[in-house]
Image (cartoon, grey):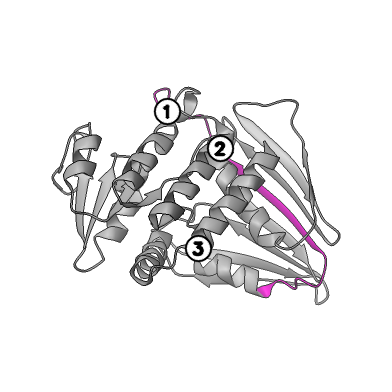
Amino acid sequence: MKILILGNSSLFQRKIYYSLKKIKRLKIEIASKRKFVLNKYPISYNSYKQAINKTKAKIVYISLVNSEHFKWAVYCLKKNKHIIIDKPFTINYPQTKKIINLAKRKKLFISEAIVFQHHKRFKKLISLLDFNRYININSKFHIPKLEKNNFRNSKSLGGGCFQDMSSYAAYIIYLIFSNQKYKIKSLDNGNNFNNFSFLVKSKNRRMKSSFKFNSNYKNQIIIKNNLKTYSINFAFSPPINKEVSLGIFDDFKKKEYKLYFKKQNTFDIYFSEVLKLIKNREYNYFYNEIEKRAKIKKEIS
């Protein structure tokens, strides 16, 4: 089996590559317009179009600047390729809807590479929640100022805080408020390029979230539920090289403790799931999930 990577992103070099190379019998092809140095892995193509036209890979991972996602996703689908796209899937709902419709017609797999929810710690957190009791969530993802040449600083390249981080927000809402009637209220004064925040409320659930560029680093989820408070740091981007913890405070027993989890690259689990779904031709779940999350992002914006 082959997979074609479009692009030479930092995420690919730090996490994705090391997950893919663990998969036996998977050959990685890379299309990059820049010089590529990663364990001396060779570049297969220096043209994206040529790569898609010539490759025998059935799967294409699109790891390009945000503004390029839609263009190359459509091109790949028309060439009968399954596609995986870095977050954000696209920069707006109409683009996402067009990709979904095309994938359905072509009977091809599509996925947005959101992976934080695959971590054992996050799964444990969700398993501990009592969804019949009131749930109050406070989440923050703030990052320091990016380097000047980072494409996320450019609106024309699909940058900005909302495009970079709204996929995380949409996934949490999709998960926690599933089958709930809820309202979303923006807490920003207009559409700010460097931050967005919002409040989500339903009958028995509440979530307040803040996402920022150019700020002191914060990456946490705190959940109060059934006389317990759960907290996780590095929530949306758990490190792959060290263990992480889930903090728990039991208000009834007045006791605080932590659960520890070994280091884990969540892309390992993600790719294992994706390859299994493609093999079994199980695509409908991802069509529906991507569309629901795209609608949520539209509501947030």
Please tell me which residue is depicted at 20% across the width and 34% down the height of the picture: 47
Residue at the extreme right of the image, as rendered: 203
Q: Residue 266: horizontal and vertical position, in percent?
A: 43, 61
61 in the magenta segment: no
Q: Which residue is mark 2?
A: 94
The segment highlighted magenta reads: 128-149
Distance from disc 1 to disc 2, alpha carbons, whole Å, reads 23 Å
**Tag 3 secondary structure:** helix
* CA gap, disc 3 and disc 2: 19 Å
Give me the disc on residue 151. 1
**Separation (CA) of disc 3 from disc 1:** 33 Å
**Left or right: 193 with respect to 55?**
right
Badge 1 amino acid:
Phe
**Mark 1 or mark 2, earlier in chain:** 2
Which is nearer the N-term, disc 3 or disc 1? 1
Placement of 107 over or under 169, stated as above or below: below
* Residue lying furthest front: 105
SS for callout 2: helix
| Residue occupied by mark 3 | 284
Please identify the quadrant where the N terminus is shown: bottom left
Q: Nearer the viewer, residue 136 or 297?
A: 297
Q: Position of residue 112 (x, y in %)?
A: 46, 51
Say if mark 3 contacts mark 1, CB within 8 Å. Answer: no
- Crowd tier of the residue under label 2, counting other residues whose Cα lies within 10 Å: few below 14, some 14–19, many 20 or above: few
